Each structure stands twice: as C-alpha cells, then as structure tokens.
Amino acid sequence: MTRLGVRGRLFTVSVLLILVVGAISAVYLEVQLRSWLRNRMEGELATRAEAARTALEVAGLPFDPGSVQPLVVRLGGALKARVTVLDAGGRVVADSQLDLPAIAELERHDGRPEVVAAEAGSPGVARRHSDTLHTDMLYVAVPFTAAGAAGVVRVATALEEVDEVVTRMRWMLLVASLVGLMVALVMSFLASHLLSRGLRELLASARSMLEGPGAEGPTPPQPPDEIAGIASSLTHLGTALEEVVETLANERDRFEGILEAMAEAVIALDAQHRVTLINGAGLQLLGLDAPPQDQPLLDALTPPLRDALAPVLTGRAEARDIELEGRQLQARITPQRGDEGIVMVLHDVTRLRRLETMRRDFVANVSHELRTPVSVICLNAETLRDGALNDRKRAPQFLEAMLRNAERLRALVSDLLDISRIESGKFPVHPETIPLGVVARRALESVEKLLEDKSMRLDVHVDPGLAVRADAKALEHVLINLLENAVKYTPETGHVELVARPDGDRVRVEVRDDGPGIPPEHRPRIFERFYRVDPGRAKHMGGTGLGLSIVKHLVASMEGAVGVEGNAPHGAVFWLTLPGADGEAPAEDDPAG
C-alpha cells in the first residue's frame, strides 16, 4: 500500500475530524434534548396534577370508587394523562385508564416514591416502568383533601413522546450530518487540493532556489510527499544560506581590511548626505574621533572643513581639487549603484602637487641655467669663426669666456648627476666613526683660495676628540658647499665660523656668516633645487643653484637633519646634526677619518 500524499492525508484527517465532531455533537444534543424534554414534561405534568387536585377538592366527593371514578375518567380525558386517586393508606380509589374490577385487584401504592413524597406534604416525582401499562411512565403526585378526608392524586404520562421526539431528532441529525458531511467532504477535498497545489508550488520554488536557474545534473530522489520535500529543500537551503552568510562575512571582513589599509579617505553617504561608512583614513583626514553614523557629514565638521566640502557634495563632478587647511585634496564622487547616495574618495595630493611644481620649476631652471652658458659659448664660437680668431687681443677673451661657461656647464651637469645619484640611492654612503676635526680641516683647505681672494677670516671651533657617524667624503662635500656659500655671500673682510658641539646623542655643526642673511619667508624653500633668494645676485656670484639641495640629500642619507636660522646681528647660520659616535675616534692624522 503506497503512502498517502499530503492531499490524501489532509482529506483523511478532515473526514475523521468531521465524523468525530459530528458523533460527539449528536450524542451531546440527544442528551441535552432528552433532559430538556423530560424537564418540560415534569413541569406540564405538575400543572396537570394541580388542576386535578383543584377539581377533586371542588367536587368534594367521598373516597369510594363509585363516586370518584367517573370524575377521574373525565379528568384523564381532559388532561390527556392517566389520573389516579389514592386514599391516605395508599389504596387506589380510582384510575382513569382502569375499570372498577381492575382497580380492586391493584396492590397498594403506599410504597411508591411519588406517593410517599405527596403524603409528606410536597409534590412527588418519579420515573419508572409501569407493569400495568408495560411502558416507561412519568409520575407526579400531590396531596389533596376532599369530604374531610386526605388523599393523593397522581397524574402520569408515558415517556414514549420523549423517545419519539428524540428518535425524530436523531434522524434529523443523521440527515443533516450526512448533508453536512458531503458538503464538508467537498470543501475538504477542494481545500486539500488547493493546499497541496500551493505546497507543490512552494516545493518547486524551494528546489529552484536551491539548485539555481538553469541547473543541470542528475535528478534528486523524489521525497515521499510535498512536506518532506519542502523540509528537505529548506534544510539544504539553510545550509546554502549559512555558506553564503559565511562567505559574505569573510568578504565584509576583507572589504573592511582593505578600506582600513587604504591611505585615501573613503566616505559613503546616503541621499541626505548622512554618513553610512567611513574608514580610518577618513576619520584622520576630517579630524573625527568616531564615525558620525546616520548623521549628516557637514554637521559633524568644523566650519573650515564644511566650507571646503559643501561645494563638492552639492555637485556631481567626477573629480575636483579642493584645498583643505593648507592641503591639496582630490575629491572623487561616485554615485552608489541602485541608491541615491554617493561614495566620496578624498586623496591627499599635496606632495604630488608639490612634486609637480618642483618638476616644472626644475625643468624651467635647468633650461634657464643651460641656455645662458650655451648661448655664450655658441656666440663666442661664431665670433671666432667669423674672424675674431685672428684677433690676438680679443681672441683670448672669447676663449676665456667659452672656457668659463663650459666649466659652468660641467659643474651644473656634475651637480645634476650627483643629486640624481643621491635621490636614486646609487651614491655610495658608508657611515663610520670619523673625527670631525679632520673633515673640517679638509673643507677649510678647499675654500682657502676663496678666503684669500676676499681677504676673509674663517674660524674653526671643533673639539679634536669630537667624532660623528658619517661618510667622510659626503660630509666633506657638505661642509665645502656650506663654506663656499658663506664665503660667496659674505662681503670682503667679513667673518665666517665653523662650530661643532655635542647635542645629546648627536653632534650639531654650524656654519655662521655675517653676510646679508636669508629672510624668514625664504628659509623653508632654501634647500630646494635652483631656488634663489636673489636671482640677480646669485647669477653674478656664480653657482648652479643645486648645492644646498645636494647638502640636504647627503645629510638625510647619513640619518641627519639640516636647516637654516638667522645670525645676530645679521647673517645666516646653516646647521646640520649627525649621529654622535660612541667610543674613541680614530687619530686625526688618519686621512680616511
């Protein structure tokens, strides 16, 4: 026998439920109806008994069968009930359904419950089988007094009426139950069919969700019914959902990790410009301690930030440069897919813009620096070619100018190569412990001719035991550049000092001059390539404009720092700090330091 499907089981359960409910309802109704009918008959029979008592008391007949029997027969016909009169001893005096001979043969009724109750002064009620009439009877007896004697009048009726009514009701219930059962069966069949169809559609949908559209492969075993199929599909679907949720959680963690690792500020806003996502770089850039979730971004910012970002948020530009508290930012706006919100990416391009400016300045300065000596060389060469070569007086002057500008080109190219090698890390720097006095003395020897030409004095104040961790050649190059600049820009008979002293775990070296000095507004850019405080004076004094930039890069490669300050009452102080050396320095007569 095959197992029932969902529709068969629903139909069977519905039929059993209808049958059980119908049977219980029928039994309950029969019991209630039978009880109600009997109570009603008792009430009616009590009324008839009262009527019979009134008639007997009004008639006032003596207690003998011949006098009472005719009245009792008439009362029985009028009341449509059996009327029996008994004397105080329980002897039957008259009966509406018996003749006198039969009455004489009746036994005494003094032991009957209804008679006993009536003789006690209250109405008596009893139900029992009558041996005389051979049927179940309902008896109601009441006391009465007639002709100075007390007696009991009893009214009885057969309970067949109750049985007939109950039987009729039983048939009516049966017919109604059959009709209701048929209707219920039809409705149950339709309901089970519709529910089964809905379950089949739900099962098909669950399988489609589980297998995916267009899925091919072996057909899975069919479940015994739709509910089992749905349960199986939901179990597999739950497993698949758990895998999807786990995958999404991993993707979310990976996405959050990528966002937090980004140097750019990423801010996601909804249609009302409320913050829905912001990474750590965004918090740092905007100066926020915590993400302003579900709060408009502009409300969480300070006025300067609000004024800078407000034009960007109101527009739909793909990219726009803004200035934010001295920084150059590039804001890129991207609409969110399927939403009215936007994703804003803020990239700090301050360094990039500075590098672009430096590159443009570098190209312009190099072109400018190369153009002048090349023009001089070309012009002098053309002049010599056109006949000045034979001019013994002027020819040497032209050649000297060509040599001087060629030397300037050589120095410029050499400095460009040096700074390129330093920036690319190809300039060999090997820090070691060296005596600072030895390097200072070599630098002094390199600028002696400049000092003599300008009648200047250079004082060196370096402790012979002071040592640093540095590259000897790089440090010598740095000191020569600083000393040459100091001598060039200091007037004749001026004064230059080279001072070194310990500064904690480092050594501070200063080159002081009493020249015109460097205004404070130029000091932050003095170490940039080709930057000149006074271009006219710088060209007059020579130089490539790369010396201080080389100094900065060389000192940085030796883990040092460099800067410039004002010198009182006038002049400039170029300083640098280098790591100090632990232990005893090599002897000062060591040429390698």
Image (cartoon, rainbow, N blue to C red):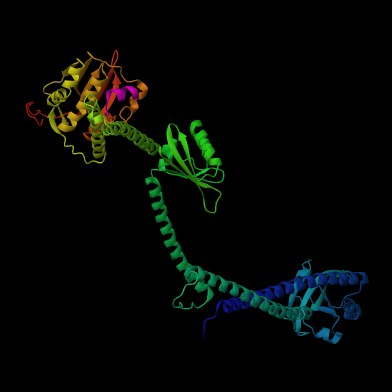
Find residue 531 and report its horizontal and vertical position in percent. Answer: 33, 29
The magenta-colored residue range is 535-543
Task: Inspect the magenta stretch and tell me whether residue 241 lies in it.
Answer: no
Q: In this view, does 476 lie above or below 223?
A: above
Depth order, front residue of 310/125? 310
Task: Inspect the magenta stretch and tell me whether residue 537 lies in it.
Answer: yes
Q: In this view, does 263 lie to the left or right of 128?
A: left
Find residue 479 and report its horizontal and vertical position in percent. Answer: 20, 26
**In the rendered image, is residue 288 in sight?**
no
Find residue 55 and report its horizontal and vertical position in percent. Answer: 90, 71
Q: In which quarter of the image is the C terminus?
A: top left
Residue drawn 35% across the image and 24% down it: 522
Q: Main secondary structure of the magenta part?
A: helix
Q: In this view, does 297 lie to the left or right of 554?
A: right
Q: Is residue 208 above or below residue 131?
A: above
Residue drawn 35% across the image and 20% down it: 519
Q: In this view, does 418 lie above or below 127?
A: above
Find residue 338 and report its horizontal and vertical position in percent. Answer: 54, 54
Depth order, front residue of 254/5? 254
Which image quadrant for residue 100? Answer: bottom right
Instruction: Give the number of marks.
Output: 0
**In the rendered image, is residue 126 in sight?**
yes
Judged from this view, the residue extending furthest toward the right is 59
Depth order, front residue of 115/579? 579
Residue drawn 39% across the image and 55% down it: 250
